[in-house]
Image: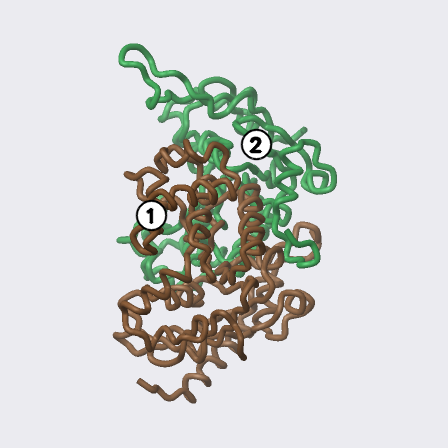
Amino acid sequence: MTDALYRIEGLRVEVADQTRKPLFGAAPRLRILDDISFSIERRSVLGIVGGSGSGKTTLGRTLVRLVEPTAGTLIFDGQDVTQLSDDAMRPLRQRIQLIFQDPMSALNPRLTIGRIIAAPLRAKTSDPRVAAALDNVGLPRGFAGRYPHELSGGQRQRVGIARAIALRPDFIVADEIVSGLDVSSQAQVLTLLANLVKDLGLTLAFISHDLSVIRRLCDRVIVLQKGKIVEDQPVADLFTSPSHEYTRQLLNSIPEPDPSQRW
Amino acid sequence: MSGGYLTIRNLSAVLRDTGERVLRSVDIDLQPGTIRGLVGESGAGKSMIGKAVLGVLPKALKVVEGEILIDGQDLLKLKDADRRRLIGASTALIPQDPLTALNPSHRIGPQITNRLVDILGWTRRAAEVRALEVLEEVQIADAARVMRQYPHELSGGMRQRILIASAFAAEPKLIIADEPTTALDVTVQKQILKLISNLQARHGTALLFVTHDLGVVAKICDSLSVLYGGKVVEDTDVASFFNGPHHAYGRALLAATPRHTDPDASLLPVPDDVIAAVRAELGEADRQWVRHD
């Protein structure tokens, strides 16, 4: 672990459980993430896997500091960012980007694609960086004048990726970005991401519930269950020798396109 | 083609506004006691076929030709009331989203029994006994308590089990499952799929399984129809499809499906020339098609 871009130590996230709050006094605390420690090496892809409710989305949001950690330290590129104020965080924000799960609700329906990509750059749509971002994700430049509803799901997800990479970030969190897509567009988006990681030297945290997708893209995988890391392995080892029972269960449940083993 | 419990022949549906075809001369044959997968990308029309059978097509669509035969009777020629009676008695639906399919303000019990009492004329007592029976059949522990609970008190997997129980409650001959596991985790998905295929085998139900996941088809279906643009481009049994699809589009779709056991095979999107070829096929079919309405 010589060249870690992001190091997370002893991370804990708790929220107040308002459904069980007594009439007087504080609501009981609900622990979402518990004692999470891992690091992401520069120019590598980390897979974050888990079932629903395992805390993987909360972890992703904590990595981009959208969720405040209760305890633990986040060290990004040698700098402790756990307690940074909003003002101090701002220059770092453009180095850390998030791509959302549902591209339809993540893109403003009233803005053209060009304006959506230009907004975080604080630039005009004619800015060359907008065209470059569209080139990077393999969309025609003419798409800059279109609206999100004119695009297919796969194309919208590419716009989400274009918006994130236009800022030339070092680190991107991709939260279930292919789970709403057809297999064919899924294959396109995965290939695109793999190429971008290579060409732009990105570091990526790829959140997914689908282990078969993880294998294509990731170098290392952590498996979450009920807010705890139960497995942290290089991707090939995870598939050949999973150490935790839950990982074995996950692997066992993937429907392989192979009719010789029926359920 | 003969002897299927559900037989769809030459079914075409158009958009009322533009006259554009949404279903293109669809032929589907579903034998009793088997599962047929209906596969395609979004917009291929796979859900529309299920809706056409149940008679709940969106108002913007209109069936212009073809037959939907259930047990030899053409649904499209029946009067509305007769068609509803036949569908109600013989067919059930397992919907996609278990949260929106259950009424949040009613307890689970009545949501299963009301259909039996109101539509099929069972007594309330008999319906309740049957509901308990099927809930146990879908492996819900403490079924009597669950019947008094509300949907929000149950997990997604539990809710989907309840909808499956409800579908099998009246011993239907035909079940249409519309992507019943896309909202679930992989581990839960496996349990639910096993449950559906066990129940289907035990009751000898004919099951039309709408899905976009070829992996799921390989695990539980007997035969499959691959759809593109509302046209069946491949109709075959599961073993021969996975040994080598005949149609270029089927091959491309299979190549785009991830396999974790084979990490070196690269994941290929459906190539543009395959899409162009299958579109040309549709265009040719449309040119030859004469409207009969």
Q: In the image, A5: left or right of B121?
A: right
| Chain coloured brown | B
Give the residue pinned by disc 2: A224
Image quarter (top left, top right, bottom left or bottom right) of the N terminus of chain A: top right
Tell which subunit mark 2 falls on: A
Chain A visual colour? green
Q: In the image, B24: left or right of A209?
A: left
Q: SS at mark 2?
A: strand
Image coordinates of residue A39 in percent, x first then y, are 60, 29
Dot 2, crowdedness within 10 Å: few (<14), some or many (≥20)? many
Q: For the point 45% across and 45% down, which residue is it?
A: B160
User: How many numbered marks, from 0 up?
Assistant: 2
Give the residue pinned by disc 1: B123
Q: Nearer the viewer, mark 2 or mark 1?
A: 1
Farthest-out residue, top = A25
Image coordinates of residue A203 in percent, x first then y, are 56, 40
Residue type pointed to by label 1: Thr
Residue type pointed to by label 2: Leu
Q: For the point 38% across and 73% down, which residue is it?
A: B22
Which quadrant holds residue B252? Answer: bottom right
Q: Is residue A100 visible?
A: no
Up-down relation of residue A188 to residue A52 (above or below): below
Q: Is residue B194 visible?
A: yes
Which quadrant holds residue B102? Answer: top left
Tell which subunit mark 1 falls on: B
